[in-house]
């Protein structure tokens, strides 16, 4: 098929899923056209089936806000017409679903039919999308999509709860490339970070409020009092400064390292003994899945789709959002016994295998066929 993928090109979340899906589709022989405002960060290799179309928005003194959605719709029309696409797959509803709807209507006026699938990723529903300034457009464009997928059962249910959705939502979970995300032997790094054999805890995110990184630090503080340990914080974002201050207040700054944004996250994950994800909201938790693929058990909150990925008592533990005492207790119970730790690491890896891209790609391909056949 000739597929147009519309996404955010940024690190993390929906952009990563969209880019990895496009790469896998291209490897499977489909022609994939990325339509976005800059080169997706994970689009880092050449493949004869991958094309990239940049959306640029002309500025004009009248525009206090650049009309990206109009520019995107115009670019979609251009690409569909010139590349003769069969299908559009847009990731993250705002503003991609409404831009696709607009493009579809413009193309219809030219006698061309193009179906579009919207994949809901999380904050487009649970945070930003339900804001009254977006809700009517989000509801309308989801209902007008020819197909809708959500990355977890939890996100599907939230969508039905928060919006008046009449369409059927298909759950297709996120996936992982196990050839890339696997435990690598990096013993020399581990010795450099944990010179006295300390246990290594880790968290990666975009450092937004919704991640509750203060809980990560509180859990670490409690663990650190019982077990010699270090904490690696990977990523960057608005909360970084306040988290650094919290580390100083709690007196754990010597045991916490901030690594900033990293491309080769699997190398650092390979060093970790435990991954912490304490979010307030998390539709799926791709970061947790990446850790599990590198044989790292998870201590997580019970937000959104996290319990669908992290199986309580098997691949790690799930606690109520904000219950840092329970999280610390669970973390200690895993870390204090090497046999228990080894069992959780094994289980985490086994669970990650279920989300192998090889298992999930056919679900998307089948869905593409179903949607194009019926529309
Ligand atoms: O986690 C983020 O803040 C980024 C965000 C996004 O929308 O790009 O991630 C969301 O999509 C990911 C991919 O489907 C999910 O793994 C994340 O759980 C989800 N984040 C939230 O729901 C907060």
Image: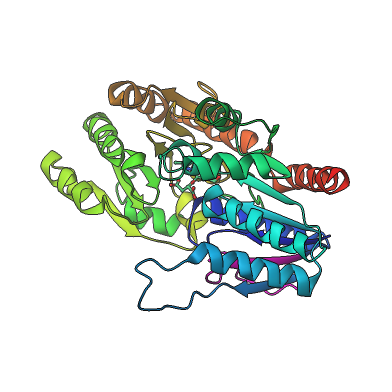
Is residue 40 something one can see in this rendering?
Answer: no
Residue drawn at (40%, 78%), measured in percent from left and top? 60
Q: Which residue in the rendered view is the most extreme toward the front?
A: 109
Please give left or right for residue 374 compared with residue 314 in the image. Answer: right
Indicate yes or no whether the magenta region holds residue 39: yes
From this viewpoint, which residue is outermost toward the right?
373
- Quadrant placement of the N terminus: bottom right
The correct choice, above or below, for 84 with respect to 293 in the image is below
- Specify whether residue 313 is in view: yes
- Left or right placement of residue 6 versus residue 132 in this view: right
Q: Main secondary structure of the magenta part?
A: loop
Residue 47 part of the magenta segment: yes
Viewer-proximal residue among 282 and 162: 162
> 76 or 35, which lies in front?
76
Residue at left 36%, top 74%? 62
Asked if residue 189 is positioned above or below residue 64 in the image, the reply reads above
Q: What stretch is highlighted in magenta?
A: 32-49
Q: Where is residue 236 in the image (x, y as percent from the top left)?
A: 34, 57
Residue at image point 77% right, 59% down: 108
Relative to residue 281, is residue 353 drawn left or right? right
Residue 157, above or below 277? above
């Amino acid at each position: 098929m000739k597929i147009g993928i519309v996404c955010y090109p940024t690190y993390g979340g929906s952009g990563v899923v969209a880019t990895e899906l496009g790469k896998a589709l291209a490897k499977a022989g489909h022609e994939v056209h990325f339509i976005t405002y800059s080169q997706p960060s994970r689009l880092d290799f050449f493949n004869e089936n991958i094309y990239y179309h940049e959306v640029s928005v002309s500025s004009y003194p009248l525009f206090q806000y650049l009309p990206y959605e109009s520019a995107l719709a115009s670019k979609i029309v251009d690409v569909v017409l010139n590349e003769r696409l069969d299908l559009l797959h847009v990731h993250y509803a705002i503003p991609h679903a409404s831009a696709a709807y607009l493009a579809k209507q413009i193309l219809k006026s030219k006698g061309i039919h193009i179906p579009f699938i919207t994949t809901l990723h999380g904050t487009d529903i649970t945070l930003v999308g339900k804001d009254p300034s977006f809700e009517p457009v989000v509801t309308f464009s989801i209902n007008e999509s020819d197909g809708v997928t959500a990355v977890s059962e939890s996100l599907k249910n939230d969508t039905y709860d928060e919006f008046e959705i009449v369409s059927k939502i298909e759950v297709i979970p996120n996936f992982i490339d196990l050839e890339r995300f696997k435990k690598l032997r990096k013993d020399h790094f581990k010795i450099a970070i944990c010179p006295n054999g300390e246990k290594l805890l880790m968290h990666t995110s975009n450092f937004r409020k919704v991640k509750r990184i203060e809980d990560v630090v509180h859990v670490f503080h409690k663990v650190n009092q019982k077990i010699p340990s270090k904490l690696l914080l990977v990523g960057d974002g608005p909360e970084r400064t306040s988290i650094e201050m919290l580390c100083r207040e709690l007196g754990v700054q010597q045991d916490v390292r901030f690594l900033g944004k990293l491309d080769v996250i699997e190398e650092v994950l390979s060093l970790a003994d435990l991954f912490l994800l304490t979010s307030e909201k998390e539709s799926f938790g791709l970061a947790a899945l990446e850790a599990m693929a590198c044989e790292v058990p998870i201590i997580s909150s019970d937000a959104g789709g996290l319990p669908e990925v992290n199986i309580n008592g098997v691949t790690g533990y799930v606690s109520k959002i904000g219950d840092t005492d329970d999280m610390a207790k669970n973390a200690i119970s895993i870390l204090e016994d090497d046999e228990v730790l080894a069992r959780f690491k094994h289980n985490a890896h086994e669970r990650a295998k279920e989300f192998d891209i090889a298992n999930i790609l056919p679900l998307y391909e089948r869905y593409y066929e179903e949607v194009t056949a019926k529309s």
